Structures are given as C-alpha cells and as structure tokens.
Amino acid sequence: MGGKIGELEAEKHVRYILLVEKRKDDFESVVTEHLRMNGAYWGLTTLDLLGKLEIVDQDEVVSWVMECQHESGGFGGNIGHDPHIVHTLSAVQVLALFDKLNVLDIDKIANYIAGLQNVDGSFSGDMWGEIDTRFSYIAICCLSLLQCLDKINVEKAVNYIMSCKNLDGGFGCTPGAESHAGQIFCCVGALALTGSLHHVDKDLLGWWLCERQVKSGGLNGRPEKLPDVCYSWWVLSSLIMIDRAHWIDKDKLIKFIIDCQDRENGGISDRPDDAVDVFHTYFGVAGLSLLEYPEVKAVDPAYALPVHVVNRIFFSR
Amino acid sequence: MHGRPRKAPKPEDTAASAAKAEKLRALQSQLLHNHHNQIYTKEALEISAKLLEANPESYTAWNYRKLAVEHNLSQSESDPDTVKSIISEELRVVENSLKQNFKSYGAWHHRKWVLSKGHSSVDHELQLLDRFQRADSRNFHAWNYRRFIVALKGISDEEELKYTTKLIETNFSNYSAWHNRSVLLSHLLQNKVKGFFPKEKVLVEEYEFVHQALFTDPDDQSGWFYHLWLLDQTVKPETPLLVSTWPVHGSDIIVSAEGCLDGRALSPFTSFHSDAGTFPLILYFNEAVEGVNSSTVTVKSVFTENKDLVWKPLATSKSCAAQAWVTHLNVPDVKLHPSTAYPIEVNLGDSQGIISLSGSHCSHPSRFAFTVCVQPLSSEHVERQGVEMILWRDVNFHFYDAHIQESSPIAYFDRLSIKKDHEPAASKWHAKTLVNEIALVRQLLSEIDCKIGKLTLARLLMAHDAMMSYMAPHSHKKVHSEEVLQLFSDLMELDPMHSQYYKEAQSLVLLQQVTSNRESLLKHCCHHRVSTSSSVGNSVCLRLNNLSLSRIGCVEQLLWVQMLDLSHNELRSIDGLEAMQLLSFLNLSHNKLSSFTALEPLRLLKLLKVLDISYNEIGAHPIDRRRYLCSSPLSHSVGSDWNFNEFVPDDAKVTNYWEAFAIFRGFNLMQLDIVGNAITDEKFKSFLIKVLPTLKWVDGEELH
C-alpha cells in the first residue's frame, strides 16, 4: 500500500483551510460567498479527517449555521441567501461533525425536504423546480442522517434514479442525460443509503468507472476528459460502494493527489501546478482517506462524512 | 480552481482583484437588499443582471429575477409587448451569463424556467445551442438543454439521430454524441419505428458506423463503449431463460432425514440429507427475474400442494428480483412410504409473469422432472456425525476414481445446464455477427497494439463460446478459452493499472473451463474423510482451492455442491454463492475477504454448518467496501430482529462488532474457524459465541 508518511502536507492544508475561513475580502471569497455553507462543510470535514477539528470554534460555527436557516426549514448558502436543498444538507453535515444534530428541529427540515419531492419521485433543488439526481441524493442523505427517511416516498425516489441509468451502466442528471462521475456518485450513493444497490450493474459500471483512471494515475469524470482531483472522490467512492475499488491502481492515484498539493502554502488543486481551493482540498484528502492513506481518518463513501461521525449517529447506545 | 495555473499573484493583480471584489461585493449587498425588500424596479433589476453576468452561480440573484418576472408579468396586464420585453430581457441576461460560465447550472435552469412560461418562441434556441455545442461539444448542460428543447418543439428521434451522426462524423471522439445516439436508438428500436425494424438490420449499420471510429483512432474510448453496447444488444437474449435447476431433469434424488447410509457411495448430484424435513428446489435464470411464484411455476408432487409453495429470490438485498430462486418441498413421512420413488414435475413459462428487470417476460416454456426417494436414517450415523469436527487438510481428501460407476457426479453432467435452440434464425445472425466482429478486431490488432481492442476481442470470443455451447448442446467445448486466458494475461502486462479487473475476468474463464466438461470437473471432486474408516455426511467435496481465483462464477453448474473448498485463492467477495442452497461445508480460508459484510451471501445458505474464514483480512482495513452491499442500519435495511445491543459486551466499542452481528445473527453454524484475521481477540470470540449459540467448535477447539 502506497503513501509514505510525510508526503501529505497535512499541517499546511489545515493552515490553508483556516486561512480561507477567515479571508472574506478577496475576489475568490466574494465570488463564492453564496455557497459558504458548502465551503464550511468541505473545510470542516477536511479538518476532521486530518484530526484537527478541535481548532475550530464550534459554537461560533453552529450559531452561524443556524442563522442561515429559513422559516421553511431549509438553509441558505450564507446569511441572507435563499434556502436550497444543497445547503440544507451541508448544514446538517456540519452539525453532524460537531455532534450537534440535537439543535435542529428535525421535523421542520424533514418537511422542507419532503416538500421538494415531485410526483415522479424526483427532487427539486428549491421552490423554483430545477430537477436533478444530485437533489435526490441530497434529500436521501439528509433525511437518512436525521433518521426520518420515512418522510418521503423512497420507492418512487429510487425508481426515478433508475430512470436516469444509462446503457454504459452510469447515471446522468435526468433521464437520457449522459453519465458523469459526479452524478454517478449521487445516484449510487442514494441507492446505497436506501439499501438498493442491487439495481446497479456493478461490473458494467465498475469497468466504466475504473477506465476513468488515466496514464498519470488521476481520474477523469467522463471518457476522453482530463483527470481532476475531485474525481478521486466521485469515482472512488462510487467504486467502493459497489466493491470494485481494487480495479484501479491505488498507488498511482495517491501519487497524483500528492502531486496536486501546494507544498508551500497548503491546499490541493485539480491538477498539478494549478491554483488550489477548498473544494479540491477536501476531495484530495477524502480521496486519500478512501485509499487508506496513513494519518487520515476513514471517510464513509455514501454519507461523505468521517466514519466515526456516521457510526456515532447509527450505532451509539 | 479548475484549470487555473497556480502562481503567486503580482502586486498589480492583487490590487485589480481587490477592486473587482469591492465592486462585486457592492452588487451583492444591493441585490440582497432589493431581494429582501421586494424591489423590482428597472434599476434594481439592472443590478442583478450585472451581478449575474459577473457571477452566474449566484443562485439567490436568479431567484430574485424569477420573483421579479412574476411580479412584472402580473403588472403587465397581458400587454404582449411588455410581456415580450420582460421575457427577452431574461433570455439576454442568461445568454450573457453563459458567456461568462457556460457550465452554470443556475443560468441554464433560469432559461428553461423562462421558456416554460410559454410566452416566447423556442426557434432561436437550437441556434444558440449550436454555438455552445460548437465551442464545447461535450458540455453536458448544453446537451441536457438540447433534450429539453427537442421535447418542447416535438422534434423526432430520427431527426436527432441525424444530428448525432453529423457530430460524430465531425469528431469520432464525441462520447456525448455516441451516448445520445444510444439513447435515441434504444427508443427507436424498442418502439419498432419505421426504418428501425428489424433490429438486426439496424445493428449491422451501426456496427459499420462505429468501425470507422475504431479504425480512425483505436485508442479513443468513445467508439468502444458504443461497440460494447452493440455487442450487448446482439448477444443478450430478448427474454429471460431458465438455465439450470436443482434437482436436474431426469435425476433420481435420495433424501435421508439425516446423514447418509454407511457403505454407499452416493452421488452428490442425487443424494441429499435434510435435518429440517424439507429439501430445496432451485431455479437458475440467465438474468435476474421477478415474479417467480406458485402461479408462474407449477410443481406437481405428492409432498406439498403447489399453491402452498413459497418461492424466495436468492438475493442479498431486499430486492424482489434474483437470478436464482428457491422453494422448499416437504420430505414425506419416511415410515409410511420407504423406498418409493415419487415423481415430481415442474413447469414454468407457460403463463406470463416471470419478468426481467428490463420488463421482458420469460416466454419459453420449460419443464423438468425428477423422482425423490426417501431413505430411513441410520441412528448410528447420526450419533457419529454429532461429534466429528471437519478438517480441511489434504490428507482428508481422496480423488474420485475416474472409472467409478455411472452414478458418480458426472452421470448427470450433460443435464446440469438447460439448452434449447431458440429462434434459430436470430441465433444464426448473432453467430455470424460475432464471427465478423472477431475477424475485424483481429485485423485491427494486427495493425496496432490497443488494450481496449484486446479486451473487446476477449469479450467477443467469450460471447461466441457461450453462444456456441448454447446452440450446440453436445459439443460443449469452450474452444477459445485458452486464447481468452492469454489475452487477459497480455492485458495485465499492457495495462497494469487495471490488472485486477482483468484478473477477475480471467478467474471467470478459468471456472468456465473447470465446469465445462466431465473430466475437468472430476479432477476437482474429492471424497472427504475424517479418518480412513468413516465419512461425514454425503461428503463429496468440490475443491477449487489454490487456483488464484479472485471471482466466483459458473454457479449455475454447481448447484449440487454440498461441500466446497475455495481456500488459498484471492477472493475479496463471494457474491454468487447464495445460489448454492445445498452448501453445508465451506472453506474460505486464506483469501482476501476484508470484512464480515463480505460474507452476506452466506446469510441465504440455511444449511451451512461448517465455515472456515481463517487467514483473511477481516478487520484489517479502515474502509469497508461492502458496507452498503449488506443489510444494516446505515442503509435502513434491517428488520425488527436487529437487537444488536443485547449481544455486545458493555465495555466494547460497538462499531467493531456490528458487521459481525449483521452477518451472523440467525446462523446455525456448528463449526467456525476465524483465526488469522485482524479482528479476532478473546472478547470478540466471546461475542461470536453469544451470537452463534449452535457453535461447537471455534478455531479447532471444542466449546463447553
């Protein structure tokens, strides 16, 4: 198993994430201001996987998260922004990291999410009706973490996801849409969380997914595209959920991720020598976790949270 | 940031960026102010437009504009000019935003939302799309939008198919276009649209079309994925088929209530001992099916009324579909009718109702018949069986004498799988197509060494072998298996990154070889004896040990197996074993099983008594790859029998134990070997003994 201790610049990545959290004035943070809830989830989960979550002022984060909640039950991407299912999941995940799900009015969130399910089983992202299998995953993951999956029609939700299955074994955003590794993660994840992975053609999809590994060792998201660190998460977590992760070369992927680090200032980028961001830093570290890299905590491939957090929710007594 | 080079910013860049940020920040706070105060004036809208053109992902700004459109439309009193100007302004803002970022989900959705209002023409949309698709022919947002517009305008599948032809001819590497082609063509074939029937004719044209791509750039994946889909369309039977059963057609089954009689070498194919007073009847299909029940399958017997038979799918999930199905027939009362051969007849496929996942009905009627004879049980034997522990050492195994009488395992070999000559004309076309494709790929490979071409050749050869053995039942030879094995060995060298994939494929070919004829199967059949004088149960063991297997297959040929040795292989998963309902003794030691959850198929083996999982990797990996393939609280798929906490020692870390509990609860194991796994310590062992109250031996030690 690859992964030499010392190659992962864990401390620098922690410093980088803390810096991004504080930075509010440069163009990058302004342009991403509307998805800060997402960013918080990426950054904080990375810190937890690196064993440094305690650095963060938990109360400050929790009260900010709760300020983003709307009367409808949904959360916005930042204070003042509209509620959306994406940010609602991120908020729940952040609270789960801190073992603070008890601050939530669970019924209220569950009703918000259940209200976004359409008659065909699909989910809208918010009241404006954009439909995408990403939102199916989000709804299922969120309700599952809150242990109230019975609020939605799971059978219809699964049927809708299956209607997005393609002839290459993958899944797209909507019926007929091309397979894409990010979308495959969402669909496979939703099927995993509802005990429905028997619907997946594991060998066909597994081969398509393992063929995402290109010569450099990195993974792309669709055939004939460039590799990108974020697919270390989307592809690998999907491969793990269907038990086909051994079909790729783990050592080469580890090397690719390690090569995408900014060794000076911390952070991980999409490809070697590109500019880093929190998104890719999370996907790089989470990818290393799935690859059982030493000194990185284990991450759950379906809930996209550290395994200890998921186990705390489902197995504590 | 996607695709942006990493470099230290120059001072002048920092200043420019700060100014830009300042401007954007001002727009954002003005937008939020207008949004919260429901201000929809022209000036306010202009601010949101500027913001979105700079930052198209600002979803709250799109929401604001939608509210504004609704507000302003309601104020317009349906004046067509006002309505038109409101709508065209929205389309303009979207177009400008897409120029900034044509992957913006928010912008594309806003456009759909506006058009769905129905106030504007969609004619302009395809031109706009052409521009975007020319700039990036793989942009899946544009493709999704295209499907939306096509549906809105009612453009036919044939028209769209032509569009994909045009794009593919421009660039063979356009996977998105190939994908859309497969979607459209499936619709057209399924609906038997004029010009797209018969299917064979269409597929021939598609093969020709894709050949151009394969020969132009053999290393490009796009065409090959399409080719794989065509191959699947060619070889996959249109309706599900029954491929094997237990008991097999024409067999005479001997059931003893417990153990077998001394001194008689009973064939494992024909004799079966039952403690539960029942014996299983197994149906194995070529694909997962639903709807096997007492109205779709008729079992004529004196033992159990057909209507009382309950059929269960052998699936490791809550699925109601499976390749293998089982029901249990009651063993008749031994004392009343000793040594009478009772006939049993099974019929299926006469009525519709057995359906594949793709919705096609099993429409080929199948019938099979066998007899069942009941043997009184030997009390001496029962006693002995109660005290013997199974040892899997080589000295306990003795090869079958190849000259043994006809009642040996091979007697029924030819009947193990069911073969029929369905749709001869179609089969002839299928075989011809495969031969053509094989020749073509060989030609390609003679010009260039290409991994995906080699893989395709291996797949074609396997499909051809499968088809030939199916069409010609008595010459059951896998003629190409040596070549296929060699191709996979080459591939492991050529493409080491995916060597495990090739290795698994190779394992399947190897198992096909082993199970493809009497002689090779016999080489793996052994008698099992505890000592020289006695035998345990009906102890013929199929030994598939030491074969470097990383995958199990050909289970349909092995439904008769009661004792199986898979030790010293490289198995990470045992998926498929769930169909071997007669299995009582199983050795999985020295493999690569990395978690208890990998043992989920065993939960369906109700007769399993002896299990050896020693020297695997259970507990050695922080990431459990089988976590979501087994029933557990994580996937909300456990029932009321999940009383886990009752079994876990108070001071134990719960998370170390739940997987073992998920698998072993309800098992009736007598003997378990688990030594040599990372998980095992004394505390864990005592937990296992609590969960498995029937255990007599653990790791070779007798429990007291």
Image (tube, grey):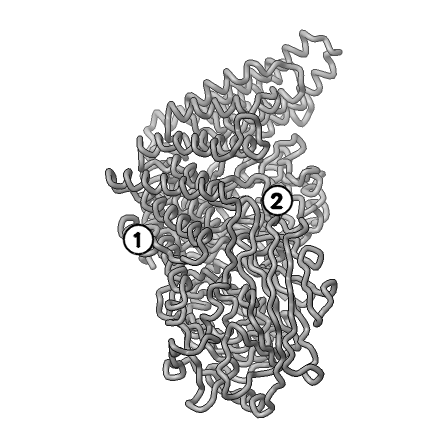
Give the percent coordinates (x, y) of residue B69.
Answer: 67, 19
> Mark 2 belongs to which subunit?
B
Task: Give the structural element (helix, strand or loop) at label 2.
Answer: loop
In the depicted structure, whether residue A23 falls above or below residue B17 = below
Which of the 4 image quadrants contains residue B336?
A: bottom right
Q: Quote the CA–CA distance across marks 1 and 2.
A: 36 Å
Which of the 4 image quadrants contains residue B3?
A: top left
Q: What's the residue at 43%, 66% (across, down)?
A: B620
Residue A207 lies left or right of residue B319; in this view the side is left
Disc on res. B359: 2
Give the percent coordinates (x, y) of residue B98.
Answer: 50, 22
Which image quarter holds the N terminus of chain B?
top left
Q: Residues within 10 Å of mark 1 (few under 14, many from 20)?
A: some
Q: Amino acid at mark 2?
A: Gly
Which image quarter holds the C terminus of chain B?
bottom right
Residue B454 lies left or right of residue B158; in this view the side is left
Q: Amino acid at mark 1?
A: Glu
| Residue indicated by mark 1 | B483
Q: What's the residue at 37%, 48% (across, down)?
A: B461
Q: What's the residue at 46%, 34% (across, down)?
A: B203
